[in-house]
Amino acid sequence: MKTWITYIAAIALGFAANLLVGDLEILTSLVASAVPILLDLGMLLLFPLVFILFASGIASLRRQAETSLLFSSTILWSLTTTLILTGFAAALYFLLPLGIQNITTNGADASTLSTINAIQPSRFFAMIVNRNSFLQFVMTDQSLLPVLVLALLLGLALKPDMEAIRPAYVVMNSFAEAMLRLARIFTILGALFIGFISFNWFNSVDAEGRFFANLEFFAMIGITLASALFFLLPLMFALFTGFKGGNPYRVLFGGLSAYLAGFFSGNILYAGTSIIALARQNNGVRKRVAGTAVPLYTVLGRGGSAMVATTAALALIVSFKGSLPSWQAVMAIALLSSLFSLICSFHLGYETLFIVVMVLRNLEINLEGAEMMLVVLLPFLNGFGALLDSAIATFGAAYTSRLVSPDDLVAYSDFV
């Protein structure tokens, strides 16, 4: 059965279970205890998967003289989507300047905001260069950057331009195929995980006190999200590929399971394994591109988080001050959101909050602690951001792959 069917069915079951037995304290506590384990299991494969695929992909790209094309197209897609999405969110807010209302911050962790700070340069460079390269694997579980750096060095050396290196290149490619098979298995099993995760999400989120109390604000978020998913990203994909990249909505549909995983987990790394597997299997993205572009997008392509953060920051300002700031200030918020999205991957699970807090600090906008409302709304906002970031990575991988070479045409019957 297709994963888009099993994932939607699992989420529907999670929602129904919450309505029927969501008041059973024993059950909810058991599921709440199991969800962190399921999230860890969902990410269990990601770091070795990325290391092997990235090293193998870089070696193959060097063999075909396509390395510069991949990196330039990845950076171009990341920056362009981020700027367009944040600019669109800012422009939309002039039409619908709606604030956040009726949100109580009771129960929110007040220490969360104090932990939001830009990454220190010393820690950033330690992720790139470490005197013991094996520490790159255990440096952090919040970002793929340390693993990518080590895989890049190995991939550069694996270029099969010498007879002695070709066996190592072949072995690494074989490992890459094996890891892709495991990724497909994990993606299929992810439907079971997402059922429990969605049950816990529906049970822990105060929909009545947070969602329904701010229907206008969330309606605007919904308009922004739908516009990005169904209009802006498909249009940009078509323009970037010269309208020769195939049906963009087929590309969008091919990654649906990953978007759902990203939303309910609020974690793009949890969705990362599925994004890679679905890009290769459903969208026919070349292995060397799926294994290199997608990991890079988890670091650089965070336009979805930036878009949601732009909307949330403007909503806070309207709620606190009662009016929308000047268009210069609005565009400054959009641009700074784009800028800070480039380093938000180091705050996994808090990307949207990190961007908003850093934007307000740098513009010296004092809201006297009103940012705590975002801590309460974080399951919604970070979920929306992770969903859009997953879609950006899916489209980006397809765009880069079509630049490198014609993709394999995948029949719907072969979809995972």
Image (cartoon, rainbow, N blue to C red):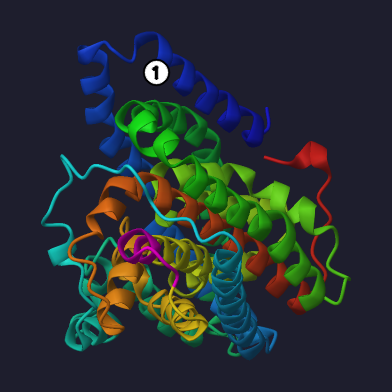
Foreground of the two, 96 or 269: 96
Placement of 275 over or under 398, stated as above or below:
above
Which quadrant is home to the N terminus?
top right
For image coordinates 28% across by 46% down, the residue present is 376
Please say whether residue 77 is one of the residues in the magenta stretch. no
Q: Which residue is mark 1?
A: 18
Which quadrant is home to the C terminus?
top right
- Tell me where residue 397 sits by quadrant: bottom right
Segment tinted magenta in the rendering: 316-324
Q: Residue furthest right?
A: 244
Whether residue 170 is visible here, answered yes or no, is no
From the viewer's perspective, is 283 left or right of 371?
right
Foreground of the two, 21 or 293: 21
Placement of 184 over or under 162, stated as above or below:
above
Q: Residue furthest front?
A: 322
Please say whether residue 323 is one of the residues in the magenta stretch. yes
Query: Residue 118: x percent and y percent?
Result: 24, 78
Query: Residue 403: x percent and y percent?
Result: 76, 78
Query: Residue 366: x percent and y percent?
Result: 22, 73
Whether residue 203 is visible here, answered yes or no, is yes
For image coordinates 52% across by 69% down, the residue present is 303
Q: Secondary structure at mark 1?
A: helix
